[in-house]
Image (cartoon, rainbow, N blue to C red):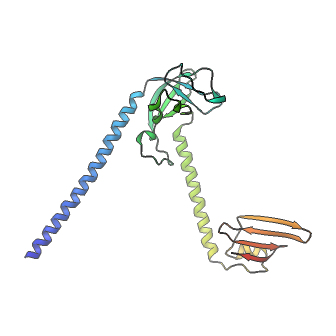
Amino acid sequence: MKMQILVVAAVSFLGIAMQSHADSFVSDATEKANKQAQKELKLREKIGIDLWADYPNGCRLGAIYEKPDTKYDVGKYTADSPKKVKVLDLIYVELPYQTTTKLDSQYWYKVEVEESKQIGYVESFYMAYLGSPRLKWCLSLDDPRKQRQAIENANKELAESHALREKKREQLAKKPGASIGMTAKQVMEKTSWGEPDSVNRTVTQHGTDEQWVYSDGGYLYFRNGKLYAIQN
C-alpha cells in the first residue's frame, strides 16, 4: 500500500514538473514574440520619412543623410549633390550567413530615390545612427532578398560538391594502393590514390618528371610516365 502511494506521488510530481517546464517554454516563446512585435512596431515608425542619399553613378553602395546639407567624405565616389529618398517599407530578411541575435540586423528599409525612382535598401541597424559618419556605405542598391537566394544557391552547390568528394573518397578507399612501376593511368584508375589535386612537372634532358600532390599530404613521383617513388 505504501509502495503504491509512493509511486502515485512520484508520478504526480513528475507530471507537475513536466507541465511547469512546458509552461516556462511557452512563456519564453511568447515573451520573445512580443519583444519582436514591439521592436518591429518601433522600426515601422520611420516608414514615410524623407532622407537624403549620396551614391555616384556606377556605384552599388552609398551614404544616407538625415539632412540635405550633410556631407561625408566618401573619397573619389563623393557625388555633387545628395538625392532625396523616401522610406517606403520595412522588410524582413534572414540572411543565411548572419550569426547575430540582434533583431534589427534582420530588418531592412526599402527606400526610393525621388528623382530617378531608383529603389535601394538600408539595414535598419544603421537608422539608429542618422547624422553619423557610420552611415557612409549603408545604402545598397541590391535587394537583400536576392543576396539571400544567391548565398543559399552557393551553399547548396558547396554541399553537393562536398558530397561528391566524399562519395569519390569512399569508392577510392576500396581500391588497393599504388605500386612502383605503375603508369599514371593505372594509378588513377586502379588504385586508392586516384587523380591528384595538382601536378608539378619538370622537363629535363633525361625526360619528364612529375610530382603528383594530394590534399591529404601524399605525393607520387613519376619519371617518363612510370611511378618511381611514393611519399605518404
Please state which of residues 10 and 175 is positioned toward the viewer in this rendering. 10
User: Where is residue 84 drawn, in percent x and y?
Assistant: 53, 21
Instruction: Look at the picture and state if 229 lies above or below 213.
Output: below
Answer with the quarter of the image where residue 222 lies.
bottom right
Residue found farthest to the top: 69
Quadrant of the frame with the N terminus: bottom left
Residue 68 is situated, as x and y percent measured from the top left of the image, at: 53, 19
In the displayed image of the protein, which residue is found farthest to the right?
205
Left or right: 28, with 211 as reference point:
left
Residue 32 located left or right of residue 92 = left
Q: Position of residue 182 (x, y in %)?
A: 77, 78
Q: Where is residue 16 in the image (x, y as percent from the top left)?
A: 18, 60
Residue positioned 36% across, 32% down in the render:
42
Seen at 26% across and 49% down, the residue is: 27
The residue at the point 55 percent across, 54 percent down is 156
Quadrant showing the C terminus:
bottom right
Left or right, 74 with respect to 12, comes to: right
145 is higher (above) or lower (below) than 190: above
Work out whether residue 24 or residue 91 is closer to the camera in this orientation and state it: 24
Q: How many marks?
A: 0
